[in-house]
Image: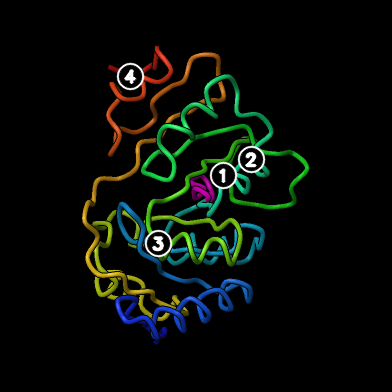
Amino acid sequence: MGKRFDCSDLEQRTEGLTEAAAAVRRGELVVLPTDTVYGIGADAFTAAAVTALLDAKGRGREMPPPVLVGTVRAATALVDDMGPYGQDLIDAFWPGPLTLVCKANRALSWDLGDTKGTVAVRMPLHPVALDLLKETGPMAVSSANRSGAPAATTAAEAEEQLGESIAVYLDGGKTTDNTPSTILDITTAVPRLLRRGAIPVEKLRGIIGYVATDD
């Protein structure tokens, strides 16, 4: 069974972050709290770890995981081009529940699945997640649940679904908002909404003007 650490206890939080970072470096999976729901995470640059993440969720390569970062600088290193809107969106909504789909840096050696040359990147607004990400660097992170099941809002719910496939569970208590992040594709001339989420379209339009939706 994976080790579980109560991050409301300072000693356990410190030990848990150390253990989780070590597990990620070994290519193992961890569960961490975010500002939306709990996530299952792996080193974004270890292909076998990303495959293990997809296997744990019961998901195929056609649904590549997003990448979470602990700093804006880490995000820009992953991206070939933020386009005319990327920096304004980051300034307005990061850290927070906005995932930006960008053209990936072609010089990077990684395999997240069938990405078609893009990467979905986000900086979460959660102290435990940010501390871990600053230690590990970019992580592939997807919601901590089996594909098709409800997203976990507690570490216990994540453990129920994912069990021994996870090396370390970081327990940050119940997440305050289980609304998923808003996903916006900025790889084209007109930004396109791919998923409605915690940040309303009206707020996005307030920053960048027109946003295409399927409505």
Q: Is residue 206 above or below residue 62?
A: above
Residue kind at label 1, given as amino acid type: Val
SS under mark 4 = loop
Specify whether 166 is left or right of 52.
left
Specify whether 11 is left or right of 70.
left
Of residue 54 and residue 169, the one placed in the foreground of this image is 169
Q: Which residue is mark 3?
A: 127
N-term mark: 1 or 4: 1
Measuring 65% from the left and 44% from the top, which residue is drawn there? Answer: 78
Q: Are marks 4 and 3 in contact (CB under 8 Å)?
A: no
On the rendered image, what quadrant is the C terminus found in?
top left
Closer to viewer: mark 1 or mark 4: 1
- The type of colouring in the image is rainbow
Q: Which residue is mark 2?
A: 76
Residue kind at label 4, given as amino acid type: Asp
N-term mark: 4 or 3: 3
N-term mark: 3 or 1: 1
- Residue at mark 2 to residue at mark 1: CA–CA distance: 6 Å
- Residue at mark 3 to residue at mark 1: CA–CA distance: 15 Å
Q: Residues within 10 Å of mark 3 (few under 14, many from 20)?
A: some
Q: Is residue 117 above or below residue 214?
A: below
